[in-house]
Amino acid sequence: MPKSAVRIRLPSMKDVAKRAGVSQTTVSFVLNNVESANIPLETQERVLAAIEALSYRPNAMARQLRLNRTHTIGFLSDNIATTPHAGNIIQGAQDRAWAQEYLLLVVNTSSHVTVEKAAIDLMLERRVDGIIYATMYHRAVTLLPSIREVPTVLLDCFCADRSLPSIVPDEVRGGRTAIELLLRKGHRRLGFINNVDLIPATFGRLQGYQQALAAHGIAYDQALVCAQHSDQAGGYRGVNSLMRLAEPPTAIFCFNDRMAMGAYDALHKLGCSIPADVAVIGYDNQELIAAYLYPPLTTLQLPHYQMGQWAVQHLLTLIENPEGQNGHPPVQELCECPLIERSSI
Amino acid sequence: MPKSAVRIRLPSMKDVAKRAGVSQTTVSFVLNNVESANIPLETQERVLAAIEALSYRPNAMARQLRLNRTHTIGFLSDNIATTPHAGNIIQGAQDRAWAQEYLLLVVNTSSHVTVEKAAIDLMLERRVDGIIYATMYHRAVTLLPSIREVPTVLLDCFCADRSLPSIVPDEVRGGRTAIELLLRKGHRRLGFINNVDLIPATFGRLQGYQQALAAHGIAYDQALVCAQHSDQAGGYRGVNSLMRLAEPPTAIFCFNDRMAMGAYDALHKLGCSIPADVAVIGYDNQELIAAYLYPPLTTLQLPHYQMGQWAVQHLLTLIENPEGQNGHPPVQELCECPLIERSSI
């Protein structure tokens, strides 16, 4: 039978003192390198040997209480369970936190306000040094007042009055990049299957589409833009409506990769070859879809990892230099969505 | 200009005492409901009003130090960033922890042993009450000795000597369920595109395949089983090799949904209709793929959420009743993979 793996009581400073044959005060002096205590070298070595032998760990919590810093960041998010990107947001945040020995206390609220309130209370009680508030798609958020008791950075979201620092994807620039690539390849009839949801990505990408056309002197044609639910079926329907036009598009910008997946199916059913007959570009770079469609999908990447890193980096700046931001409006950062070129254009 | 949102110093017990015009001892008596102190009701109310007015929060860390319990669980995982299921493992763990006011301190190590060692050290220094060690696919793990200093439960993995409690998917039963469904639908030539990786899922699902055939008196035909890389291209190749047999299968069990996605492409290219000509069943229930293929894919679900819940529940049992497991071998739990029926069979 395997031996029980659990050892319940951790060694204390008292245990170390006993083993080394010294007082707890001496152990404390050695641990804290108090030179004025003039502990003989031989005694210091005996204490260190006892620490080693017992695997004694100084109680970080007690030390943190003295220093009034816990090196812990609350990471509050709405819904990571149903979001394939979620891992990258958390990984980016964690990697940056970790580099400075901060750990993340993670709570997902599934957007329940009562859970959110309780989570913030628990985080504040545990004296987190700051909070990252992350959403799983770019949107405006309404925040509970208590979150403002510590430095807070918004990740993939923003509050309407811009009273907290925030980082979100640059949707306008992403839309422009997609359309400029299609224009460079010689396309002039550019379809856009947009999302019906009234969210910043919908407006931003449309604005980018319009800016790129305008910059190339191409008139905006409302007939080439349709709005559908942002899933495979929406992409499928979008292609069927656009390709029925008297002058159908030669290239289609899909609001996301899932819609592009449905667009592929519809184009194949219509006997259109990608990209020879119709070029397709997506958005999100959902690896699982984009890299494995035939042909692999050219798309724009949502910069989740980078946004996670930036949010923590900015939060650490606020924590470590709380006066540094006085008089400046909270930073509202836009993060570029890089173009991932594959074979669909 | 938006006003600065950050209030740096949290109110202390001293602030409460000052505002209420009482001593800190009185505040402490009121907070801790010390009846023997005989604090007049009017004074109690003044203290409570001051607490309310200042949004004073008792310092949970100080209280935890006294109680020798932090209500914090370390959640150590290998790689959530590249894993679409990861969110559900964490969500299941968190929901169960949360129900008992435990929070998760999350660190992903990307399987770097030095990061893992440092993470465990930090977690122990912060006096986590226990650790969940999670992997993103079912596998054997080698653990650093220090993790055993607190109660630990393995999630989606196990250690070779079974010296720690563990929960993993029941791969054998999953394979059997898939094949029994195909047999019930009348199929007798059953192809299996397995994975080349030598991992428990590969062996377990094959064992389930063999058990189901044996139970129905069908001889095992090695020619119907092939091993491929566990991605779309592997599924594509697998179909092409199986369908070239003199007597090809009428149904194909794919090791995972990504392989099923490639199998769909290959079958469509061969002019086979799904499920009329060839039935297909996958594994994993990767929502993004399985629900949106044409036709939607019947598959088995990896029970990530349930395993996350079980792991925390079991850990809390160990934390709260450390002696309860004495003399019993650590539990090795198998979690059922539910069948998700769609339209590919």
Image: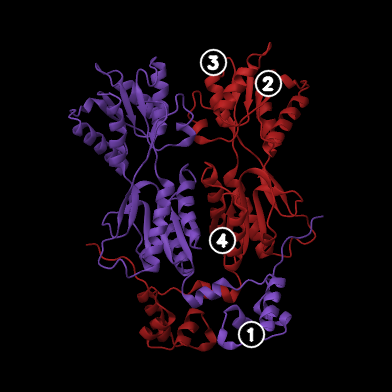
Chain colours: A purple, B red
Asked which secondary structure carries label 3, the reply is: loop
- How far apart are the two marked residues, 4 and 2, measured between alpha carbons? 47 Å
Judged left or right of residue A332, residue A117 is right
Q: Identify the chain of the residue marked 1, using the numbered disc in the image.
A: A
SS class, disc 2: strand
**Element at label 4:** loop
**Marks 4 and 2 in Cβ contact (< 8 Å):** no
Which percent across, then down, holds residue B171?
68, 37
**Circles 1 and 4: CB distance less than 8 Å?**
no
Q: Amino acid at mark 3?
A: Ser
Instruction: Specify the label residue B190 is tagged with.
Output: 2
Tell me, for residue B273, which label it has, or none. Answer: 3
| Tag 4 and tag 3, C-beta contact below 8 Å | no
3D distance between C-alphas at marks 3 and 1: 80 Å
Check if mark 3 and mark 1 are on a common chain.
Answer: no
Residue underneath mark 4: B100
Q: Is residue B156 left or right of residue A273?
A: right
Residue depicted at 27% across the width and 54% down the height = A160
Q: Residue at x 50, y 84 (%)?
A: B29
* Precedes in sequence: disc 4 or disc 2: 4
Q: Nearer the viewer, mark 3 or mark 1?
A: 1
User: In the rendered structure, the residue with mark 3 lies on which chain?
Assistant: B
Marks 1 and 4 sit apart, C-alpha to C-alpha, by 40 Å
Task: Name the residue carrying label 1.
Answer: A26
The quadrant in which the N terminus of chain A is found is bottom right
